[in-house]
Image (cartoon, rainbow, N blue to C red):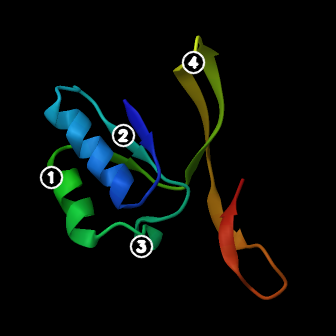
């Protein structure tokens, strides 16, 4: 099971799935841990529950079947300067 996102709702969803019996849960987030908007305590508690955090990873495709996602294609990213103003963002 994988949850896409780095906010409190993503953390809550992943933790709930663990409580419902999922054997393996991943949180896929496109930036670093330091940039996650989720509460730090929630992140640490999720890690304590053996939820695997995947940072600098983005989903770019799926294999849908009748409204369900059966698999994802993911890609690892890097943080780079993305604008002339010096803004940093994910880049492939």
Residue 20 lies, in percent from the top left, at 17, 29
Q: Where 68 sits versus 76, above or below?
A: above
Residue linked to disc 1: 48
Q: Quadrant of residue 22?
A: top left
Kindly tell me whether residue 39 is visible in this rendering.
yes
Which badge, 2 or 4, comes first in the chain's sequence?
2
Secondary structure, mark 3, is helix
Q: Where 17 sits versus 8, above or below?
A: above
Disc 3 to disc 2, C-alpha distance: 17 Å
Which badge, 3 or 2, comes first in the chain's sequence?
2
Q: Are marks 4 and 3 in contact (CB under 8 Å)?
A: no
Which badge, 4 or 3, comes first in the chain's sequence?
3
Residue visible at 57% across and 18% down? 67
Disc 3 to disc 1, C-alpha distance: 18 Å
Residue 61 lies, in percent from the top left, at 67, 31
Q: Quadrant of residue 90?
A: bottom right
The crowd level at tag 3 (other Cα within 10 Å; few <14, some 14-19, many 20+) is: few
Q: Are marks 3 and 1 in contact (CB under 8 Å)?
A: no
Instruction: Report the mark closest to the observer, 4 or 1.
Output: 4
From the viewer's perspective, tell me whether residue 52 is left or right of residue 6.
left
Residue linked to disc 3: 34
Residue linked to disc 4: 67
Disc 1 to disc 2, C-alpha distance: 13 Å
């Amino acid at each position: 099971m994988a949850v896409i996102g780095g906010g409190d709702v993503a953390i809550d969803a992943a933790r709930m799935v663990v409580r419902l019996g999922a054997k393996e849960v991943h949180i896929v987030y496109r930036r670093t841990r330091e940039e996650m908007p989720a509460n730090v305590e929630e992140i640490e508690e999720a890690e304590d529950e053996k939820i695997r955090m995947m940072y600098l990873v983005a989903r770019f495709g799926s294999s849908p079947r009748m409204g369900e996602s059966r698999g994802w294609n993911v890609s690892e990213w890097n943080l780079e300067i993305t604008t002339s103003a010096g803004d940093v963002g994910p880049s492939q």
